[in-house]
């Protein structure tokens, strides 16, 4: 009959149970796979169970309750926020346009800086509870606060200070402002770098002209100092030469004085000898050897003298001394 044939086509109870078992196995496999979570190095997983922050999974294998638990991943590696003229070409994690501000003396400047920071893993639950995602934290704190303080801190410096090297003071000032704010929001500020500061072209030309003028003044001053040193050197040299001539003149004068004293003494000796000879009549020349010595010395000193032989009395014997060949005597 037809109704018997229809009953025969319906699945048996045993077949239904088998199909149900297969479905349960498949669901169990999927549930098992879904309950396993692997957290990668450099990240943490914040467990959100039924909309509430429940736990934090650190790198490794973890189990969660399927359907009930959701995982929000936060990176704990160092991240970079950077402002540049071409943010689309930047290799930073978060790129943005330069910050425009004005110096204390009214010059417009563009600030290009880099901030390196990382999320504190111990505050991951607080971050998700208050910001949900890493991108929200960066947008609302890193970007907003750094741009605001970069603009405001820049107004405390003159354009020349920012141009000439006090940029490091500005950099430190910005870092001190941002560090406690980052800490309050679950981050650690690693470094603030002011890469460059842009100025109007007219201001750059004016500063360069001023620096050229200052360098010219320095050069002229240096040249004047060198000329002064050279003049002093010439004065010292002239003084030294003058002193040398003075000393030589003193030496010549002393020699003249000594020679005059010697000649005066010779004249005195000769006068005494002659007086003695007059007094003692009949005295012989050999009795006054000092006169002989005087005559001899004077003859030797006279370049025109023809004195050849010297007679020296010794023990009443006249000795002859041939002076031919002696230096200065021919």
Image (cartoon, rainbow, N blue to C red):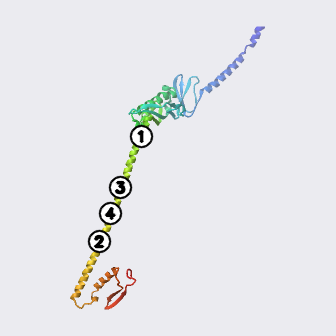
User: Count the marks: how many?
Assistant: 4
Residue beneath disc 2: 254
Q: Residue 28: where, in percent of width, then height?
A: 64, 24
| Front residue of 258 and 325 | 325
Kindly identify which numbered label has been placed on residue 209: 1
Secondary structure type for disc 4: helix
Residue 180 in view in this figure: no
Q: Residue 215: where, in percent of width, then height?
A: 41, 44
The answer for how far apart the CA atoms under marks 2 and 3 are is 34 Å
The answer for how far apart the CA atoms under marks 2 and 4 are is 18 Å
| Front residue of 215 and 46 | 215
The answer for how far apart the CA atoms under marks 4 and 1 are is 49 Å
Residue beneath disc 4: 242
Secondary structure type for disc 2: helix
Quarter of the picture containing the C terminus is bottom left
Residue beneath disc 3: 231
Identified at 27% across, 76% down, the residue is: 261
Identified at 29% across, 75% down, the residue is: 259
Specify the quadrant of the image occupied by residue 213.
Answer: top left
Could you tell which of marks 3 and 4 lies nearer the N-terminus?
Answer: 3
């Amino acid at each position: 009959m037809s109704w018997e044939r229809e009953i025969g086509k319906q699945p048996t109870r045993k077949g239904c149970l088998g199909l149900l078992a297969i479905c349960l196995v498949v669901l169990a496999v999927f549930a098992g796979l879904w309950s396993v979570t692997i957290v990668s190095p450099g990240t943490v997983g914040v467990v959100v169970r039924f909309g509430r922050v429940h736990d934090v999974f650190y790198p490794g294998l973890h189990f969660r309750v399927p359907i009930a638990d959701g995982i929000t991943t936060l990176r704990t590696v160092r991240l970079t926020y950077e402002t540049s003229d071409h943010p689309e070409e930047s290799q930073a994690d978060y790129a943005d346009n330069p910050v425009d501000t004005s110096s204390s003396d009214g010059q417009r400047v563009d600030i290009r800086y880099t901030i390196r920071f990382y999320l504190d893993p111990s505050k991951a639950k607080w971050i998700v509870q208050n910001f949900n995602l890493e991108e929200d934290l960066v947008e609302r704190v890193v970007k907003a606060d750094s741009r605001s303080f970069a603009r405001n801190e820049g107004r405390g410096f003159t354009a020349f200070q920012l141009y000439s090297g006090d940029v490091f003071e500005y950099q430190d000032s910005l870092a001190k402002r941002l560090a406690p704010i980052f800490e309050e929001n679950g981050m650690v500020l690693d470094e603030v770098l002011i890469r460059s500061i842009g100025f109007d072209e007219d201001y750059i030309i004016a500063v360069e002209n001023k620096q050229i003028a200052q360098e010219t003044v320095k050069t002229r001053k240096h040249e004047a100092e060198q000329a002064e040193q050279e003049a002093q050197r010439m004065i010292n040299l002239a003084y030294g030469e003058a002193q040398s001539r003075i000393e030589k003149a003193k030496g010549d004068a002393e020699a003249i004085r000594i020679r005059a004293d010697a000649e005066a003494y010779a004249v005195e000796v000769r006068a005494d000898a002659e007086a003695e000879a007059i007094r003692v009549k009949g005295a012989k020349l050999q009795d006054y050897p000092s006169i002989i010595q005087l005559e001899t010395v004077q003859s030797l000193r006279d370049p025109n003298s023809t004195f050849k032989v010297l007679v020296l009395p010794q023990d009443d014997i006249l000795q002859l001394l041939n002076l031919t060949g002696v230096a200065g005597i021919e």
